[in-house]
Amino acid sequence: MFKTLKEDIQVIFERDPAAKSVLEVILCYPGLHAIILHRIAHYLYKKGLILIPRLISQFNRFLTGIEIHPGAKIGRRFFIDHGMGVVIGETTEIGDNVTIYQGVTLGGTGKEKGKRHPTIKNNVVIGSGAKVLGPIVVGENSKIGAGAVVLKDVPPNSTVVGVPARCVKKDNIRIASPYVVDLEHGKLPDPVEEELQKLRKRIERLEQILIERKGEKDEAV
């Protein structure tokens, strides 16, 4: 337990340059408070208790603005930056070294029983306001852009953006330690902008061709 807590504190210093001291982190980081309370609730939930873990979860939500169902499985070195509005559903499974930002939802769809929430593999970064819905899998080392709505599986080593989310980069394998997480979730490709740029260039080229042909006709006259 204490080893896990030490890792939870250490990962904040690694991923948040605003963190200045251990005391500040312990007292002022709601993401840390949320994960500590969740680990207690999850332990009791696995023992077969229902009401007490749910009460802890509700207190967690009141205290931090982060709602984590006690049934959710969360790995080591999990970091929630800021965290307000984060929702993590009952059958969610989160691997190691995962980072999520404020407003993220790991939610379910429909009223089906059983597995209905996402599985997030190791070393994933989920940007602010992203929604990952249903029993889908987000592969290792992947990145989900801010505001994306993910409804389908995400391959490992991929980047997805948009509504609904589209894969804009594959096999971006990181040459780094397993504990190094790329947090640049705001610097992602924009496929819509790229297509618009292609169209602009094509239109400019067509206009240039028309001007040249018009000039040739004037000279002929």
Image (cartoon, rainbow, N blue to C red):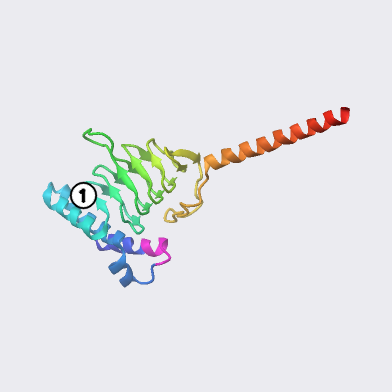
Residue at 33% over, 64% down = 9
**Residue 93, above or below 12:** above
Residue 153 point in image, percent of width and height: 39, 36
Decide if residue 53 is on the left or right side of residue 100: left
Residue 122 point in image, percent of width and height: 38, 48
User: Magenta span: helix, strand or loop, mainly?
Assistant: helix
Seen from the viewer's position, the closer of residues 205 and 143 is 205
Q: Where is residue 214, by image quadrant?
A: top right
Residue at 31% over, 45% down = 106
Count of numbered circles in the view? 1
Q: Quadrant of the C terminus?
A: top right
Decide if residue 72 is on the left or right side of residue 149: left
Residues drawn in magenta: 11-18
Q: Is residue 100 magenta?
A: no
Seen from the viewer's position, the closer of residues 59 and 178 is 59
Seen from the viewer's position, the closer of residues 173 and 211 is 211
Residue furthest toward the right? 220
**Residue 132, above or below 52:** above
Q: Secondary structure at mark 1?
A: loop
Q: Please state which amino acid type lies under the numbered disc 1.
A: Pro
Residue at 23% over, 60% down = 63
Seen from the viewer's position, the closer of residues 140 and 69 is 69
Tag 1 residue: 70
